[in-house]
Image: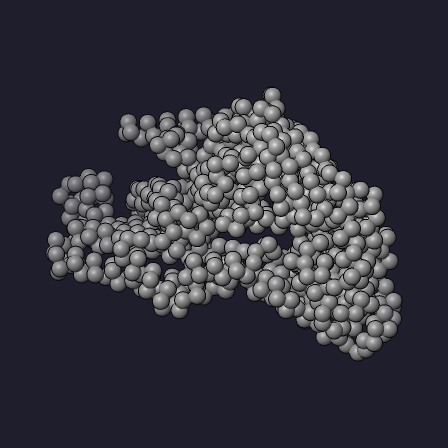
Amino acid sequence: MAKHKLAAVLLATSFLTGAASAATLDVAMDTSPAGLDPHLVTAFNSVLIVQSNIYQGLTDTTPGLQVVPNLADSWEISADGLTYTFRLAAGVTFHDGSTFDAEDVAASIRRVQSTEIASPLASRISPIIGVNVIDPLTIAFTLDAPFAPLLSSLAGIAIVPAEVETNKEALQQVPVGTGPFKFAEWQPNGFISLVKFDAYREAGKPHVDEVKFHFVPEAATRQVGLASGEYDLLPSIDPATALQLQGQPGITVHQTRDLGYTLVGMNASRAPLDDPRVREAVNMLLDRQEIIDGALFGSGVPGGPLSPALVDWALPTSDYACYTQNVEGAKALLAAAGVTGPVKIVMKVLPRQDTRDIAQVVQQQLAAGGFEVELVNQEIGQFVQDWRNSEFDMFVSANGGSVDPDQYFYRTFYSGGSTNVFKYDDAGLNALLDTGRSVTDTAARKAAYDAAQRQLACTGPIAHIAYGALSTAAGPNVSGFEINPLGRLTSLLDVTLTK
Amino acid sequence: MNTRFLIGRLIDLGFVLFGVSILVFLMIRLIPGDAVAIMLGANTEITPDRIAELRDRLGLDDPLLVQYGNWLWRALQGDLGTSIWTGRPVLNEISVAIWPTVELTALSVLVGAGLSIPIGAFMAQARGGAAEVAVRVGAIAGLTIPSFWLGIVSIFLVAKLLPGVSALGYVPFTQDPLGNLQRMVLPVIALSLPMLANLSRLVRSAMLDALGQDYVRTARAKGASRRRVVYRHALRNALIPFVTSVGVSVGYLLGGAIVVEQVFAIPGLGRLVLGAISERNYPLVQATILVITATFVVVNFAVDLLYAAIDPRVTN
């Protein structure tokens, strides 16, 4: 009997003493990352944890998508656009206590470019052909051709200690960076804990002592956990969850325009879609707002080739005549292109709920113009394979976005570009993209990309559908959080907790 | 105890594991989409060379029979392979993930089986009374409510009624015993309730059966107390179906633990195997399911032994 009493007392006290310690920010996400090496991981959750928190790049991207100094204090670009010289921040240390200098930067660039490491980030800095350490705090990169997006690309290239240049395993388990938080503990499938880095170069930051990323597979549990204060932050929640959480007391849903978009892809090497007039007719048959309302819970805005979040670059959709639904106009264009009678089209669909729903609405809208669209729902491996081999008439899919127009356009639309699976081949557009990439004058770049957007919006191989909203929910104790359109948690070092 | 009986059961164990290993091996490979396709996903910056290299490293281009033979040969030497994603030996991954599941299952058996005896005995004695009807309705409810629903509702209730109490996640017992037990309360309730409901109904009917037997009347007639008759005479005879049922329930608890681990964010074997299936992590799926099967078979083996101990007629 005494034992029973003891157990009861233990149970009761454990309930009473259960409060979490004061300055831990508890973040809940759905899956555990496979690894933490910033040059190897591409999974969204891995990037979310390591970027900005554990690691930093030479530059950084603000929530307003401006490129600002980070580990580099300042830089100079030579007149021919081929040499970038960076002045590095002084007094920066890595989490292991070693001092950050130009050798670490050089080693990090070499590591990303090495074929041994096989980093998926390599293509982002492929124009760099020479790295020259001038002194411990000055480094110069030489390029084979002018590459205007370099500075924004560098924001995503984490600087790691020089010692790990050829080591493919070490950082996967125990990351070592210069960021405001250092790695502390990883309970597989449980949580990853990062603690405040005391020697962080900005005095007084970060404000919280620990950030704990909990891996909680069940969406309902994450939601209840936020409401009960068990979790403080749910990054990147889906539109339906965001709607549910919005009304709840104490919970703030931070939202911003997503950089990624949903799309209908068209094979520009197959008749009749090889005719620009037919592609324009497809655009004119679509009612994008109806797709958004019917398939995306109304969450999203119609968008052109660039995300509206790129305020300095994106043109408003009102600039594109083909974005107004016009069935008669579409029919006239089809007739002019010599397309008569019903057109049979096979449309492959990326296996995701939103893309499946979009495909059904698009199928109906295109029927008005005489397209007989057959939808094929594919398993992911098969879809990717067909996509890569250009084995499609049309497909519905989703693309990620970036900070610079070059990253949206070059590989996707340039002749022979690495993801130009549409086989789109247009000399005029190639010239515009070359200009955008090689001139560093912002006004000249803007002019080139304006022209590119106008061309791509109506006659390009992609009918852009919608840009969704990116949402992060924060509990009542969190202040200072700011959402970043890149989906990264760049503001955790400014967050304070009031518990 | 009979040695032949023991050896016979051990040989059975070997056959079951062999059969399961073939089944699992084929099943995971017959799901469309292989590890490489999933691993690369829609990542566009990866070349065909890298795909070929990855398939080669994983041995995915060999015929299935060769792949299975290679795996079995290494498995017999105690090498169950390494995880495709983390590169760590799968046995390491399993040895970390197994403890939360073992604790969850063991506590649930303890609670479910332990409480079912007094509750079942009570229902048998108080048959027909209002209290018994209430308990019986509760038992039926316990049987029919799915664990995941009960889990989410209980998380929500604790969040509302006891704010500030951590009910989610897992802390090892050695690190924080109180925190560990506190986080186990809800999952154990959610997991053990169906078992408790099932077993107490079983104890009730077995007891009713036993209480109607001649030896019970004889015991009462010679002056044994009611309590002694219930717990010494009737219960002991009611135990045989009970023990079998507990053994079988352990298997269901392992299955239920997968669901409960999802809901309560406990990093156990269930999470490990679910994640491994969705990312087509072949070696990890095979090893984890083999471990779960072995546990199930070993528990049943132990039940058989216990059976033999309770009722010596079994071995003959």
Residue sitting at 77 percent across and 76 percent down?
A342
Quarter of the image that includes the C terminus of chain A? top right
The single residue placed furthest to the top in the displayed view is A204
Which image quadrant for residue A354?
bottom right
A417 left or right, relative to B110: right
A333 left or right, relative to B46: right
Front residue (pair B117, A497): A497
Residue B248 locus on image (x, y percent): 31, 54
Quarter of the image that includes the N terminus of chain A? top left
* Placement of A145 over or under A59, stated as above or below: below
Residue A324 locus on image (x, y percent): 85, 58
Front residue (pair A33, B237): A33
Front residue (pair A61, B153): A61
Residue sitting at 48 percent across and 43 percent down?
A166
How many numbered marks appear? 0
Residue A450 locus on image (x, y percent): 82, 50
Residue sitting at 87 percent across and 58 percent down?
A321
